[in-house]
Amino acid sequence: MEFATIKGFKDILPEEIPYWQETEAVARRTFQVSGFQEIRTPLIEAKELFARSIGEETDIVSKEMYTFQDSKGRGLSLRPEATASVVRAYIQNRLYQQDPVQKLFTIGPMFRHERPQKGRFRQFHQINAEFFGDPGPKSDAEIIVLAESLFHAFGLRDLTLLVNSLGCPTCRPDFRAELQIYLQDREDKLCTDCRRRSHTNPLRVLDCKVPGCRETVADAPLILDVLCDDCRRHLEGLQEYLDLSGVEYTRAPRLVRGLDYYTRTTFEFQTERLGAQNAVAGGGRYDGLVQQLGGPDLPAIGFAVGAERLIALLQELRPCPAGKPDLFLAALGEAAEKTCFGWATALRRAGFWAEMGYGFKGLKAQMKKADKLGVSTALILGENELAEGQAVLRDMQSGRQETIGTRDIVPLLVKRLTENPISRA
Ligand code: HAM
């Protein structure tokens, strides 16, 4: 085989597509009833947009972006996430002028040059929601409950919700300094990356997966101990709302996320069922980002669900929600083929899934195919039936057959299939 997908990229084959369609449909419905509107942004943006919002020092920007220069020498990147793009769109299109409060969602592919493994790809898909213009904590709760409702709608009840606060520009600098001293005193125990991070971005060390670093940060200072009064009240307010909505959560004082734009609330939905890639969704508040990217000083919060990880959980939970044809038309001989083609076309125009045999196969082969497709009714038209103005309807399960006249057969079939839509998924 000369060509194959590049490492970390994969085809989504027809047999998996029903999961994707269901996932997107449920997500769209869930967003809609919470007042979220869809937005679609380009897959390519200025590299600087991501560097400025996600942070130069993050793994995403420093190691994982697909960046290239266009013919004019501009640095462009495939989007590694959606938040920066949605914020840019909010500012560029002055959506805040109609109303600063905007609830937006977007679904689509993201690109990160990470080491591929189970649940981790270089092209993956996110279901992403962003809520602009409300300082919270009600909107924090709304966003978290929305993510939870999505999982609930899919029947996923065993995810763990971790919640933390990362403080704000008032209290985080003190925490950062305290953490920096703690880490620099233990520099020899940190991996090479974290030694550098302890100087440039110490909070990132809390997120490192290297065992030595994990051990070292186990006793590191906790941000919860140094939150300013406003951040503390915000967190308490959020907890009150979460309690009110009956959403269970765990306080996770060491949860930092891999993106630098967060302030105050951060959260993750985790599972034990996917191995090392345990985060199914993550999000948080990013109150400074709109202004930082050149917009007005407006707060925001959002989250993204990893669609591949969500679908991996769904695949464990239930079989593929595939549909099946309403009717299989088995034709024997060229004249019958042509007649069946006409009927299939008419049925399809009427909104029914009519399937046919191809390649002039015999009756046995066509019935085998009809069985494989899971249809409950097949129509059989041989040359004799055609000549006599008749066709045979066969109940695929019982094998019972019935002869029907071919005059006005399409309205008759439409009536039958509407009355008895057994095969409709
Ligand atoms: P994130 O935590 O980087 O956050 O990604 C969100 C989710 O995307 C993860 O929890 C995971 O399920 C999925 N994901 C991330 N990387 C991969 C990968 N390489 N392969 C498969 N799935 C992956 C964000 O991207 C933020 N923009 C979320 C957000 C929205 N915060 C505020 N608004």
Image (cartoon, helix red, strand yellow):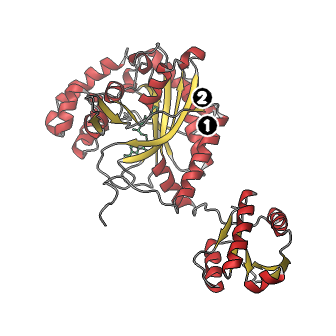
Cα distance, mark 1 to mark 2?
19 Å
Label 2 secondary element = helix
Q: Nearer the viewer, residue 358 or 372?
A: 358
Q: Amino acid at mark 2?
A: Tyr
* Horizontal side of residue 248 vs 82, given as left or right: right
Q: Establish whether ligand 1 lies closer than 8 Å to the Cβ of label 1.
A: no
Res 150 visible: yes
Q: Are marks 1 and 2 in contact (CB under 8 Å)?
A: no
On-image quarter of the N terminus? bottom left
Q: Which amino acid, mark 1?
A: Phe
Viewer-proximal residue among 338 and 186: 338
Q: Label 2: which residue?
A: 241
Most distant residue in the left direction: 188
Residue located at (54% from left, 21% from top): 136
Q: Is residue 399 above or below residue 2?
A: below
- The numbered dot on residue 361 is none
Which of the pair 326/63 is nearer the observer? 326
Q: Vertically, is 155 above or below 250?
A: below
The residue lying at 63 percent from left, 80 percent from top is 366
Please name the residue shown 56% across and 30% down the image.
Answer: 104
Q: Residue at x 81, y 62 (%)?
A: 418
